[in-house]
Amino acid sequence: MKEQVQAVIDKIRPSLQADGGDVELVDVEDGVVKVRLQGACAGCPMSQMTLKNGIERLVKKELPEIKSVESV
C-alpha cells in the first residue's frame, strides 16, 4: 500500500516543488496516510488547504481505501 501511495504523491510533488515546497510520505497506517510538508509548504498558511483539497483528494480518488491524509 505504501508504494501505491508514494506513486500518487510522486504525481503531486512537481506542482508543490514549483512553489518551493515538497511533501514526504512518512507512513500509511489503517487507511491513514501520514505526510510531512516541507520547504515553503511547511510554514504556509494555505498548507491545510493544500493537504486536504490537493493531496488528500487525489490520493483518495486513486486509492479509495484511504480514509484520510494527515500532516505530522
Image (tube, grey):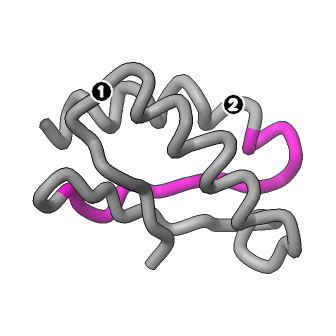
**In the rendered image, which quarter is residue 7 located in?**
top left
**In the rendered image, which quarter is residue 37 located in?**
bottom right
- Residue drawn at x 30%, y 49% is 67
- Examine the rendered structure and indicate whether residue 43 appears above or below residue 27: below
Q: Which mark is residue 50?
A: none
Q: Is residue 25 left or right of residue 32?
A: right
- Residue drawn at x 21%, y 35% is 65
Residue 57: x percent and y percent? 55, 36
Q: What crowding class fits label 1: few (fewer than 14 Cα within 10 Å), some (14-19), or many (20 or more)?
A: some
Quick one: quadrant of the C terminus? bottom left
Residue 34: x percent and y percent? 35, 64
Type of amino acid under label 1: Leu
Type of amino acid under label 2: Pro
Quick one: quadrant of the N terminus? top left
Q: Which residue is mark 1?
A: 63
Q: Which residue is mark 2?
A: 14
Closer to the camera: disc 1 or disc 2? 1
Q: What crowding class fits label 2: few (fewer than 14 Cα within 10 Å), some (14-19), or many (20 or more)?
A: some
Magenta stretch encompasses residue 31: no
Magenta stretch encompasses residue 25: yes
- Residue drawn at x 20%, y 56% is 28
The magenta stretch is 16-28
Q: Main secondary structure of the magenta part?
A: strand
Q: Disc 1 and disc 2: Cα gap in Å? A: 20 Å
Q: Is residue 25 left or right of residue 37?
A: left
